[in-house]
Image (cartoon, rainbow, N blue to C red):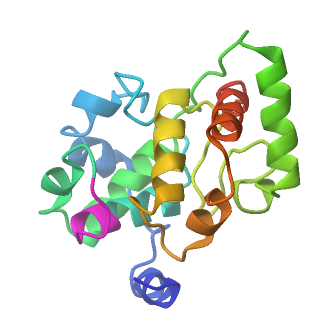
Amino acid sequence: MTMAFFTILLLSSNVFAADPILGKSKSQMCMSCHGENGIGVKKDIPNIAAQPALSIFYQLIQFRDGLRKGGNMEMFVKSLTNEDIKDIAAYFSQLPAPPAKSGGDVVKIALGEKIAQQNYCNSCHAEKFQGQQQAPRLAGQSAEYFIKQLKDLRSATRIDMDGTMGSAAKSLTDEEIEALAAYAETLK
């Protein structure tokens, strides 16, 4: 899928004209894994609280349309309409951000911050990894989930909308990915 497709989809269905109250009622099936507060119940399940609505919208569209696989998400979202997805995205996006993890390996965290700066991660994910527009929030994400997704992007097991992340991840070593994950976990 190209970015043009997603731009057309966005223009034809304004993701910001959504109802978070309806989204909460429509997202009951999501809560068994992502929790009512948008925090994954296990470390391999993403935290979706405070994700940009557009990011959630695109991810759910990709799962629904078979462009992304994982965690049986395709099964859960296959019957959702664009309106349902917009409302669900609005609900989770307005929840408080996941807590930052305190402590950790300070050397690894510092390396992760350095790698993030060198690779201009903030140009898409924002200065403190809080996400923006279609770029997901990485701040407060569990290291386990973060590492798996970045490795999958690097190996092209997972594709992204426009190839930007796949391209950015190709040169990262396992050590660098782990450092980025350690850094992201400490951000709020």
Q: How many marks?
A: 0
In front: 67, or 88? 67
From this view, report whether residue 160 is shown above or below residue 31. below
Residue lying farthest to the top in this orientation: 103
In front: 141, or 163? 163
**What percent of the width, then of the height, locates residue 78?**
15, 62
Quarter of the figure with residue 156: bottom left
**Res. 120 in view:** yes
**What percent of the width, then of the height, locates residue 116?**
80, 46
**Quadrant in which the N terminus is drawn:** bottom left
Q: Which residues are magenta?
A: 61-69
Is residue 52 shown left or right of residue 27?
Answer: right
Please tell me which residue is depicted at 76% across the width and 53% down the height of the picture.
Answer: 126
**Res. 18 in view:** no
From this view, report whether residue 34 is shown above or below residue 122. above
Please tell me which residue is depicted at 61% across the width and 21% down the height of the picture.
Answer: 99
From this view, report whether residue 16 is shown above or below residue 136. below
Determine if the magenta segment contains residue 68: yes
Please tell me which residue is depicted at 50% across the width and 85% down the height of the picture.
Answer: 7
**What percent of the width, then of the height, locates residue 168?**
67, 62
Determine if the magenta segment contains residue 141: no
**Quadrant in which the C terminus is drawn:** top right
Please tell me which residue is depicted at 75% across the width and 14% down the height of the picture.
Answer: 105
**What percent of the width, then of the height, locates residue 95?**
51, 36
In front: 175, or 9? 175
In front: 174, or 60? 174
From this view, report whether residue 117 is shown above or below residue 47. below
